[in-house]
Image (cartoon, helix red, strand yellow):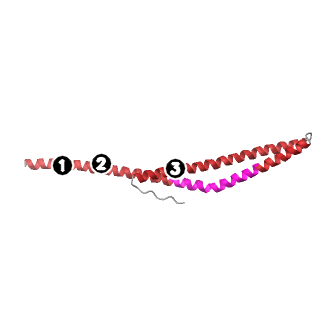
Amino acid sequence: MKQIIIAMVSLFTISQTVAAQVSADSMKSLKDQKEVLKIQDRINENKIKVAKFENTIAETSKNQANAAKEAQQSANANNDAALDLSNDAQNGKLAKKASKRARQAEKDASSARRNNDKMEKLNSRIADLKKKIAEDEQKLSAMGVMPAPMPM
């Protein structure tokens, strides 16, 4: 009887140790799966952002070209008004016209610079997001998970 009790107690402690080991392995596995899901979610969110930004490139580029064209036209009109004024420096109408054209040229040049900055910022954001996507995909492959291919 004593041997049976000792055998049962030792079997119970062995089973507890094995159960604790299985539980620790299960927890590690679940934590790894959770990390993989977080990374995959982050990759998908960044891919969506890249797609949205790439969809706005055409419109931003068009705005940039229009602003540059308007700035050049305003600069040319300002130059013409300045030449007219230089021929008749005492004419008040020509002076006012030249002043207005100069202000318009300044506004249009400023608008063109802002559009250039928007385009540069957009391209920079896209490059940063693609870099983050590549880093996260590399993390996934290091974990033994194949990342989904990026649609072009």
Q: Read off the residue under disc 1.
A: 12
**Is 70 a magenta residue?**
yes
Relative horizontal placement of residue 115, taking residue 106 as reference (left or right) = left
Can residue 84 be seen here?
yes
Could you tell me how far apart the alpha carbons at marks 1 and 2 are, in whole angstroms?
A: 18 Å
Relative horizontal placement of residue 134, taking residue 101 as reference (left or right) = left
User: Which element is circle 2 on?
Assistant: helix
Label 2 crowd (10 A; few <14 / some 14-19 / many >=20): few
Q: Position of residue 24 (x, y in %)?
A: 30, 48
Q: Residue at x 18, y 49 (%)?
A: 12
Can residue 38 be seen here?
no
Q: Residue at x 64, y 56 (%)?
A: 58
Q: Read off the residue under disc 2.
A: 24
Give whichever of discs 3 and 2 has the lower sequence position: 2
Circle 2: residue type? Ala
Span highlighted in magenta in the image: 45-71
Secondary structure mostly seen in the magenta stretch? helix
Q: Position of residue 86 (x, y in %)?
A: 89, 42
Label 3 crowd (10 A; few <14 / some 14-19 / many >=20): few
**Is 82 a magenta residue?**
no
Q: Read off the residue under disc 3.
A: 131
Question: Quick check: marks 3 and 2 in contact, CB under 8 Å?
Answer: no
Front: mark 3 or 2: 3
Residue that sits furthest to the left in the current view: 1
